[in-house]
Image: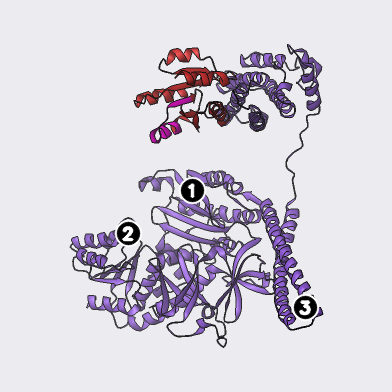
Amino acid sequence: MKILIVDDDPFVGEMAAAILACDGHDCRIVEGGVEALETLASETFELVISDMNMPLMSGLALFAELRERACAIPFILLTGDDPEPLRAEAPGLADCLMKDATLEDSLPKAVARL
Amino acid sequence: MALDISKFIQRFVDEAREHISRLELGLGGLGSDPLSERDGIDALFRSAHTIKGSARMLKLTSIAETAHHLEDVLGALRDGKIQPDPELAAVLMRAVDSICCLLDQLASAGAAALPAHPDQALCDSLARAARGEQVETAPASPPPDGDPSDASTEATPSPAAATAATAVTAPGIRSPDSVRVRMDKLDALVKLMGELSSNQARLRHQLGMARALDASATQLAACADEPTAELARTLHTFTQELRDLTLTQERLVGELSDRALGMRMLPLSLVFDPVTRVARELGRSLDKEIQTEVSGGEIELDRHIIDRFSDALVHLLRNAIDHGIEPAEQRSAAGKPRLGRVRLAARQEGGTVLVTLSDDGRGLDRDAIIQKALKMGLIDESTSLRLDDAQVADLLFQPGFSTSAIITELSGRGVGMDVVKRAITEDLQGSVTIASRPGIGTTLTLMLPLSLALMRVLLFESAGQCFGLGAPHIHELLRTRRAETIQVAGRPAVVRRNELVPLIPLAELLDLPSVIPSSTPQHHEGADATLLVIIIGVRQAKLGLVVDTLIDERDMVLKPLPAHLRTAGGLVGGMVVTGSNTLISLLHAPALLDAARRLRGESIAAAAQTVAHTQTTQHILVVDDSLNTREIEKEVLEASGYRVTLAEDGLDAWQKALGGRFDAILTDIEMPRLDGFSLTAKLRETERYRTTPIVILTSRQTQEDKQRGIQVGADAYIVKGDFDQSSLVQTLRNLLG
């Protein structure tokens, strides 16, 4: 699957990419919401995985902006805090995952469910 | 799951350590500067946040938790919920130290060596601090430096982890990664480096000699006895080894020299940053509001250049604010913002750095400058009419020149623009140019070399003597046939990329005694003879020097001239030493350009004198976006007794044409903003220029272009390649009747 990963911390972005690469996914990492929008405008992806807490544009704002632009691409949100309130706030999310060591297990599962 | 976490651990340690040093630095200054506090704390908050996030991904709970508490306190500080005080700073610093210790353990013993839980006492203190409660000054549990009480707070302390922790974290002093070195020691190193480079040139020269010896010996050996042949073979092997050694040495010396020079480089921001403050203070003392913009401070230059450059820069800044920026009332009256703007920018271009200082003030006052120059006897009445804007601006650099009506304390009495120019061009081997638009502002452009110690030098020969020129001033090298040059105002010129570049034999410019021509082909005087041309340029002004042969191109150590040999405007800027230990004069390009301009000026003045009496002066507008072409066309026309006004593109010409009355217009085609075809068409639509002769002068020579020129209403079409003085002047005479 061709996946766009959005995270302002390149460390986390690359780790998520490494986790998914083990399952044979093709990942591209960008460092912010604006860059993500530009990349999505010029290239086709099958899934966006974005961090929640980023400067300028949060992951949720990016999600809203994509839907605003009538882009229906599946969207997984990663957060450092409790994912439940976010799931409730944005029911259109494919998933919302806790950004910690469990990601190694939860992320591939969430992608497989799509 | 085959993900290898270990490779991420090392990266995490490196990145987290960077954040830790940022936190250490930031927390050190906590509370000292309330103005920049908010931004500063936000950056610290993000550092803690990043450490937390990454640590969680790697399941490094103790680090993640400590960072999490640290983040909470910094968040509360940022949002103004709590205020910084020494106790708070101490507890934050303890948190940073704790993370730092954990990182050290992680780096040396891996993730398994980390305690499963953070220092609980510390976390409690941080949590209390975040809530705004009083933090106790004496920590309940000492900083986690391997103290046994630390381990007691752990739920399941594994013995192995505990020993590892004690082992690596005991004395916490990290050795510093930099040392301070006195400038004079560095200078001595760089000087020695220069000598080593010079010596390397001599070694290279000796290698050449050895090769020549080797070649003759091999020849000799072919018809000689065995012992001689044996000797020749040994000599050959010796030469080969000497060659390898020299090449390796050359590479090493080059690298060593780069490193040594690099040590003395400092960022321009050292000079740029204080400028903002100086500008504000100056503005305040003059009752002007000034806003400064600075960019390019990250570019690095030799410390010696920075030192000498900073005085000149401050002086130029004073000039800009004192003479350039108008008082606020005048600005409002002219429809400009009251706030005067000064921009300082630097960028790197090849081996040089360009620094521009621009203001949005009143620009140069052409009339005031000319009046002052006349009064000082720098120019006479007739010259004053012929000066173009660049030449007028150049007058500012004449010794003792200042245009302000009242010489104030601020404009730096005694230190004029001439001193600035001398500092930049002679001491620093750079150049300075000034451009200005009335009412809009003035821009000064300074070109500086990156380093003074070593310079890329081109060596060449003219009239039997060897000279050098610094690479920053060399625009291009060119071989051209004499038949391809054109005559302009009685002097040869070449056309390069739609631009006329005047040529002058270097020997003539330097007034060298002519030598008996050697047998090299370029000395033939016929039309087929090839000319070797070095085109030098200072900003837009260019000049082609005709020389005899090129000799070498090398990084060389520049030796300044001794004080008694230095003269203002001297053609020699310094000396270089070659491999054969001879001294070679390094020519100073800006001085060469000035000298050539003077030479051409004299011949034009002489020609103009003879014509001027017989003819009423007709006024011609010359339009070309190339400075050189404009200048040359101007010279040609002035030599024939015409008065000339210059315009730098179609729009400029259009405005000038509407503002004045011209007897003829001479225009290029390709120009920014408005091209020659459109200009011609527009002019033809006006009443005033319906029948005025318009001549198109261009390097475009297709039939289509000519057709188009005639269509839009031009009277003549001259191709620059065919262009010579007489055809242009003849065409104009015919058209003007």
Q: In which quarter of the image is the C terminus of chain B?
A: bottom left
In this rendered view, identify the residue nearer to me: B124 or B495: B495
Name the quadrant containing residue B34.
top right
Q: Is residue B34 magenta?
A: no
Distance of label 3 from label 2 (alpha carbons): 77 Å
Could you say where residue B63 lies in the image, as x and y percent from the top left? 67, 21
According to the image, label 2 marks what residue?
Answer: B652
Can residue B63 be seen here? yes
Could you say where residue B559 lies in the image, as x and y percent from the top left? 67, 67
- Disc number placed over residue B229 in the picture, else none: 3
Chain letter for mark 1, please. Answer: B
- Disc number placed over residue B343 in the picture, else none: 1
Circles 3 and 1: CB atoms closer than 8 Å: no
Q: Does the magenta stretch include residue A41?
A: yes
The chain drawn in purple is B
As shown in the figure, which amino acid type bears the numbered disc 2? Asp
Q: Residue furthest bottom?
A: B516
Among numbered discs 3 and 1, the one appearing first in the sequence: 3
Colour scheme of the picture = by chain
Among numbered discs 3 and 2, the one appearing first in the sequence: 3
Which residue is located at x 66 percent, y 17 percent?
A: B126
Q: Indicate the secondary structure of the residue bearing disc 3.
A: helix
In the depicted structure, whether residue B684 falls above or below residue B277: below
The chain drawn in red is A
Q: Which of marks 3 and 1 is in front?
A: 3
Q: Indicate the secondary structure of the residue bearing disc 2.
A: helix
What range of the chain is rendered magenta? A35-49
